[in-house]
Amino acid sequence: MANRRRRLRVLHPPPRSPLPPGRQRTLRLHQTHRSHRPHPPRGRRLSRLLARKHRHHQYRADGPLPAISRRRNLCRLRDPPARRRPHPLQDHPDRPRLRPDPACHPLARSVWNHYSLNHDRAHLARLYAAMARYDAWLTTYRDTRGTGGVEAFCTYDTGHDLSARFWHVPDSPFGNDPTRCDPDNPVLPFIAPDLTANVICQRLYLARIAEELGEDPQPWRDKAQASLKALFTHCYDPDDHFFYDRDRNGTLVRVQSDVLLRVLACEVGDDAFFAEALSRYLLNTAKFFAKYPFTSMALDDPRFDPSFGQNSWSGPSNFLSIIRAAHAFEHHHRHVELTWAQMPVLSALFAMDTFPQTLSPFTGAPGYTEKYAPAILCLLDMVERLCGILPRPDGTLWFTGLVPREATHRHIDHHTAYRRKVDGHTFELLNDGITATLYRDGEKRFTFPHGTRLTTDRSSKLQAITGMVARTVTGTIETPNGNLDVSIGPNEVQSFQNGQLATTRTPDLVPPTYG
C-alpha cells in the first residue's frame, strides 16, 4: 500500500507546490453578448474549471510537462529482465508489470523540447541513456518478423481500447508478457504503423540529443531511415494514401482509424504529403472531420460506432488525439486549419462540468470518465494556442489574436485576457475580437489585428506575424517604434526585417472536403 501511495504522489503533485520561476501563469476569460450583458453561466463555469486546474500543470507545444517530470523514474531503470518491458513510471524495477504502456507519442521529442526550455543537461543525459535502452528493447522483442517495423502484440500496445482495428486480437500480450505474442492467434503480430512511426521520430530526436551531448548522431539517423523505409514498405497504401497494420499473413488491416493522425504527428511525410492527408481524410467530413473532430474511426467505415459513454477508440472523438494533433498541423505550418478543429472542441469544453476522455463527434456532449488529464491539458493548450501566450522550444513566444467561437446556437462576443511570466517578466495579452494588445510588465508593447499571431523573442522583440484565419487580414501593428501596415493571408508568414515586414511563407489553405 505504501508503494501505491508513493506512485500516486508522483502522478499527482501536491496541490500547493509552487511552479518554477518563469513558468507561472494566470488566465482569465470573460464573455459578453452583443448587447454587452454579462453571460455568467458559461463564463463562471470556465473560470472555475481553469482556476481549479491550471495551477498544477505545466505544458508546452509538444505535450504536458508533468509527463516529463513523472518520467524521471525511467532513468533509474536497470537493464530490465526480458519478460518486463521498461516502464517510464516504474520507480522499483523489481515490481512486476501488469501490462505494457502504449508507445505512440515520441518521448524523445518531449524530452528535447523540455531541455530546450529548461536547459537541464544532466537530466537530458539521464533520460537519453534510458531511452537508448528502451530502443534496444523494442529492437530485440518487437521485430519478430525481421521487417524493421515495430510490432503490436495486443490492443494495449497502442491503447486503442474497443477499436475495430483490434477486433479478434487480445487486449493483453500472451501470458501478460510483453515479449510474447499469442502463437495461436491467426493474425498476430501486426506490423503497426503508429508504433513504427513513433520509433522513427524517437530516433530522429535521439540523434539531436546525442549531438547535443557530444556523441555521434549518425547511427540514430541511420536507424530512423531504416524504420521509415519499413513503414512505407509494409504499412502504406499509396492508392489510399493511408497507413494500415499488416497482419502475420501479409494482409493489410484496412481499418481507417486515427492511426493516420498518429503517424503524421510523428513528423512522417513532407508538406505536400500532409496537405493530401488533410484533403482526403483529416478535413473530410465523410472521414474524420466531424462537427467536433477528430473521430477515432472514419465516419464512413461501417464499423464506426459513435457511442461515447465508454473508453472507445472505434468512433468517438478522444481528447488525447485532439491534443496530439497540434504538432502534426503546426509542423507543416497549417495553423489556420488547426483552429477549425480546436474552436468547436473548446466551445464544447465551455459547457462541460467534467473533463472526459471522449466526446460526441456530433453534439460535443461529454462522454466517458470525469477527470481525464489530457482533457484538462487540452483545454489549457487550446486556450494558449488560440488566444494566449505560448513559449516555444526554439526560444520564441507566440501571441495569438483570436477569440473563442461558439459551435452552436447564437453568436456570443468573447473577450479574453491571458497573463504569464517568462524569464521574470509579466506578459499580458488582451483580445476583444477586433484587436489584440500585448503588455510587458504593465507597458503596452504591441497592438495587432484580430486574426493574426505575433512571434517575438523572449524579451518581446518582434520577429514575425502569421495569418490565422481563412481570409486576408488588413490592418496595423502598433509598435514602440511606430506603426507597421500589414496585409496577410491564411498561414502566411511575414518576418520583421530591417524595420519592415517581408513575406517568408506565402499564403496557402486546404479547405474542408465532403467525401
Image (spheres, rainbow, N blue to C red):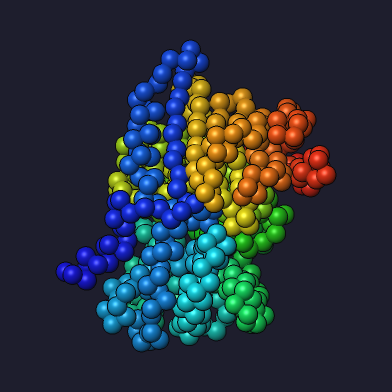
The N terminus sits in image quarter:
bottom left
Residue plotted at (63% across, 63% down): 268
Front residue (pair 247, 265): 265
Q: Quadrant of the C terminus?
A: top right
| Image side of residue 107 versus residue 485, left or right | left
Viewer-proximal residue among 462 and 307: 462
Left or right, 154 with reference to 293: left
Furthest residue in direction top, as rendered: 35
Residue 513 lies, in percent from the top left, at 63, 40
Seen as rendered, the residue at the extreme left is: 1
Q: Residue at x 53, y 72 (%)?
A: 121
Q: Let me know if residue 175 appears in the view.
A: no
Residue 77 shows in this picture: yes
Vertically, is 98 above or below 299?
below
Q: From the viewer's side, name the closer residue of 366 and 245.
A: 366
Residue 308, horizontal then vertical, whole percent: 35, 45
Looking at the image, residue 221 lies above or below residue 405: below
Q: How many marks?
A: 0
Residue 358 lies, in percent from the top left, at 38, 47
Q: Residue at x 32, y 74 (%)?
A: 91
Q: Which residue is at a point 36% across and 87% down the rendered structure image?
A: 81
Horizontal side, residue 354 vs residue 339: left or right: left
Q: In the rendered image, which quarter is residue 480 located in?
A: top right
Percent position of residue 260, x then y: 56, 58
